[in-house]
Image: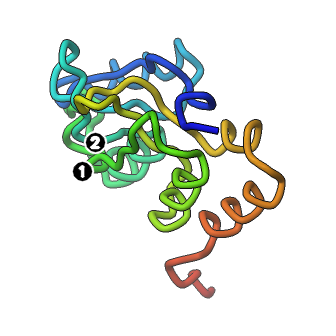
Amino acid sequence: MRVRDAMTRDPVCCTGDTPIHAVSAMMREHDIGSLPVVEDLLTRFPVGVITDRDIVTRTIAAGHDPMTMLARDCMTSPAITIVEGARLHECVQLLEVAQIRRVIVVDDAGACVGILAQADIARSASRRETGSLVRHVSRRTVPAFVS
């Protein structure tokens, strides 16, 4: 199976200049928790990703006013991508190594054409491969706070 067979096609994207409040509104409207951040909406070349968690931890929890911030201020960059023709197994390995739950899918020209999330893997891959992915991505990498 190929990445293109399991991905969500044509994801909603924003640019680095998109205000955080607009990003949040897009997430609410489309019932999603992340957006690829692209250079511009025409070429759709990915430069990062912004998640609802990024907005909370890098903006609100950091004491910044989200009404004055742009996507570039709290996005994760650079973008981690995979080509749509890659094998699903290769994508699982990428997610495990990078410890991420979703990856931006690009075409041969590098334009964003999809997004592949852990849930897409669960629907398409074997139980064993899905279990391995969840285990690797869920590994604790920062020591827990002890009170």
Which residue is denoted by mark 1 in the rendering?
78
Q: Which kind of residue does numbered mark 2 sit on?
A: Gly
- The location of residue 133, given as percent across then percent down, is 66, 60
- The location of residue 132, given as percent across then percent down, is 72, 65
- The location of residue 5, given as percent across then percent down, is 61, 28
Q: Which mark is residue 62?
A: none
Relative to 81, is 97 above or below? below
* 6, 102: nearer the viewer: 6
Residue at (50% x, 79% y) in the render: 142
Q: Seen in the image, is 17 located left or right of residue 136?
A: left
Q: Earlier in the sequence, mark 2 or mark 1?
A: 2
Q: Seen in the image, is 117 located left or right of residue 134?
A: left
Which residue is denoted by mark 2 in the rendering?
48
Direction right: furthest residue:
127
Q: Residues within 10 Å of mark 1 (few under 14, many from 20)?
A: few
CA separation in Å, label 2 and label 1: 5 Å
Residue at (33% x, 18% y) in the render: 22
Residue at (33% x, 29% y) in the render: 107
Q: Quadrant of the N terminus?
A: top right
- The location of residue 113, given as percent across then percent down, is 39, 23
Q: Which kind of residue does numbered mark 1 sit on?
A: Pro
